[in-house]
Amino acid sequence: MKPEDISQIKNVMQPVATARGLPNAFYTDAAVHEQEKQLVFHKNWTCIGFGKDVTEPGFAKPVNHLGMPLVMVRGQDGMLRVFQNVCRHRGMILVDEPKQVKGVISCPYHAWCYELNGKLRATPHVGGPGNNVDPNIDRATLGLLEVRSHVWMDLVFVNVTGDAPDFEAAMAPLKARWSEFMDKPIFHGGTDSSFKLDVKTNWKLAVENYCESYHLPWIHPGLNSYSRLEDHYHINEPGQFSGQGSIVYNPKLDDSGRAFKNFDGLSEKWNEGAEYIALYPNLLLGIHRDHYFAILIEPVAHDQSIEHIEIYYTDEAMLGDEWADLREKNAALWKEIFMEDIFVVEGMQTGRAAPGFDGGKFSTVMDEPTHTFHHWVASQFAGQLEGASIREAG
Amino acid sequence: MMDTADLTQPLTPHQADRLDADILAWHETNSAAELAYGYRTGGQDAVLRGDIDAACFLFTQAYVFALRADLLDIADSLWLNLKSFGREA
Ligand code: FES
Ligand SMILES: [Fe+2]
């Protein structure tokens, strides 16, 4: 990052009225993207996938997490664990595609075998043909490299550096906000409730666009007819998440009056309330009385992202064939909305090649959730800022 | 056909050739369970012929494929076998 970009970070951390947005380099510079991997993603709790993709004991799914090969594994004990997807012997990739590995993860190269909890179980011929012992190979110290992980709302989070605050503590504000939904079972809608969107944009622009309701009348005029701008409120939890809420959620998917089952025991607030929250860094969540969705934004490159959208329902009965048409309608509705957003998140990416763009100017009324996100990203770079000031002082 | 029974006498040359061919074919098709039984039979044959090094090589092959196929009882008995020959820890 150039010195002028670093000094601009200070401007991002001002109050919304005087702040600037993140400088162009945060969107256009592959080197900044590299720095973000460490400062923004690995140091924090970051979502890498969904538990529903690894339901059976012995099932393993590889994940390319920002270029880091990981693998999610469901143990015989039902626990989901995340490991670096690499053999401790010669560094071969262990699991190359989602598959049932049964009892062990066995390296395709020299067949070292790891238990699903990561323990190194077998080292065939390691002491010569037919001899599986080498005094220099201590199996107890050569287990798979586990990555600190936690599953919540079927979301698989990792903290790569291992030193982020305890997951429960980190998520306490959102858990408190959505306490009525916590610990209630959720059921993924299946293949009709799962889709991906490839977007030529930096992951942050997808977050920023999701945080705000300002664009609804222009980008989602259809949505605006029954969910108007004035029926939305801002959500701001500095350092954690931001987004928007609606007070007029009233889905009519079916003329016959059929409707998905609601979560049990919700208060009146949620009869027509819905909330859309960007949980930093790269997870977009939507909660309603009758369904929940998550969008995992996979940052593929500084100018390329994949949005993984997964929709969940409140009751196993909603997964039946008799509900397939409504599930498909619901998924299609969301897909249409998310696709309406693509040209703006891609257009803002293109716009950031304009050298005169200075991070932009926030509306104090409409852009606060966006600024809260920018402030958080900038603060992850605060250490760089101190380094820079020291260099300046020197 | 894979033979899951313990071997009581050494394989005839014809049976041994047949087992080699089967094992190659099972490698082609990634048939872990068949490979576990096939290599185990080979190992038992080597024990009966008194060739412990060859037996341990084949039992080790069998052990890995038993683990891959989730044949845990077979894997455990192969492990005990290998341990009795000082080839496992
Ligand atoms: S690299 Fe995995 S066993 Fe050799
Ligand atoms: Fe939108």
Image (tube, coloured by chain):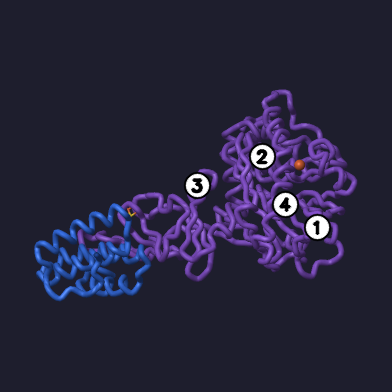
Q: Are marks 2 and 4 on the same chain?
A: yes
Q: Where is residue A226 drawn, in percent x and y?
A: 86, 47
Q: Viewer-nearest of labels 2 and 4?
A: 4
Nearer the N terminus, badge 3 or badge 4? 3
Q: Viewer-nearest of labels 1 and 4?
A: 1
Distance, label 2 to label 4, CA atoms, is 45 Å
Q: Secondary structure at mark 4?
A: helix
Distance, label 2 to label 3, CA atoms, is 26 Å
Q: Viewer-nearest of labels 2 and 3?
A: 3
Q: Chain A shown in which color? A: purple
Q: Is mark 4 within 8 Å of ligand 2?
A: no
Q: Secondary structure at mark 1?
A: loop
Please say if A354 is above or below A317.
Answer: above
Nearer the N terminus, badge 1 or badge 4? 1
Disc assigned to residue B39: none
Q: Residue furthest right?
A: A230
Distance, label 1 to label 3, CA atoms, is 49 Å
Q: Please indicate whether residue A80 sits to the left or right of residue A27 in the image.
A: left
Q: Residue furthest front?
A: A256
Circle 4 Cα neighbour tier, 10 Å, few/some/many (<14 / 14–19 / ≥20) = some
Which chain is drawn using blue? B
Q: What residue is shown with label 3?
A: A68
Tell me the chain of label 4: A
Q: Where is residue A220 drawn, in percent x and y?
A: 80, 40
Residue at (65% x, 62% y) in the render:
A319
Tell me the chain of label 1: A
Disc assigned to residue A385: 2
Q: What residue is shown with label 1?
A: A256
Quadrant in the rendering for residue A394: top right
Q: Viewer-nearest of labels 1 and 3?
A: 1
Distance, label 1 to label 2, CA atoms, is 59 Å
